[in-house]
Image: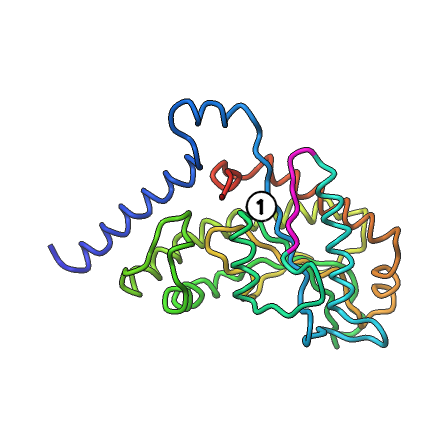
Amino acid sequence: MALVGRKYIRAAVMIGAMVLAILAGPGSSGVAGEIASLATPKIIVAIDAGHGGIDPGAVAGDLLEKQVVLDFASLLAAEINSTARLQAFLVRPDDSFLTLTQRIRRARRAGANLIISLHADTTGEGRAEGAHVYTLSPAGTDQAAIELAIRENRADVMGGASLAGEPDDLAALLVDLAQRGTMDEAQKLARAVLEAMAGRVTLLPTQPHRQANFRVLRAPEIPSILVELGYLSNEGDRRRMTSEVWNARMAAALTRGIQEWATLASPGFLTPKK
């Protein structure tokens, strides 16, 4: 059998094993599994406030993006924790600088089932205003997989299955295939969140669901979306983002969207990750 053929068979076997492990979840065998199934596990929502520390993000007068999103992250966490099934984890709980890789690793160590990355950018595109949501661009998955395969210690990704010691091209293939499945869940999450936000907060009027190759969205096993709360360069958005009423409404809408996604998500993405 050709070497390439054996490589792809090996990849298929590994993918099958990882899928079974993810769907089974921890403690799924015997009596322990039966007992665990009686209780509904918490869905861990990693809330990642963008920028921080030496990186202020966008700036508009005395408003700094890093502080705007940090304040909102705390409010969103409180709203999420008030629900029965959701539990929030603040990736950046204070004004500290984190690399994008550190953010994903923190979310992964917390057992996150999904990641919500928060930003409030500026734009020179006319009078653009309104919240919008990004998911990972399909064009970004191949390169993301290659970079992860080369850069990462791969023991803590892919549903707990170690890729350490595997050739880079095989690891990249496995990561890419897993990431494409995760992207489908991220699309569901984005649609649910936008539907919950519609009519409750101002959305970008054209294409509020956008795609880009943001590194923070590249976790291959965790559905991730990036939420732009609005534009600091827009007077209306600045007014809304500094309003307690608007912030409470936005936090409630995001939480409702996450709850709706939980009713639609593939079961493997909702199982405990730690």
* 257 in relation to 126, above or below: above
The N terminus lies in which quarter of the figure?
bottom left
From the viewer's perspective, tell me whether residue 103 is left or right of residue 172. right
Q: Crowding at label 1, few (<14), some or many (≥20) Cα neighbours within 10 Å?
A: some
The magenta span reads 84-90
Residue 204 in sight: no
Residue 28 in sight: yes
- Residue 158 image offset from top left, x and y in percent: 41, 51
Residue with the mark numbered 1: 188
Q: How is the image coloured?
A: rainbow
- Residue 143 image offset from top left, x and y in percent: 43, 68
Q: At 47% from the left edge and 39% from the top edge, which residue is drawn?
A: 268
- Residue 18 image offset from top left, x and y in percent: 36, 44
- Residue 173's quadrant in the figure? bottom left
* 257 in relation to 149, above or below: above
State the predominant SS element of the stretch in magenta. Answer: strand
- Residue 210 image offset from top left, x and y in percent: 62, 60
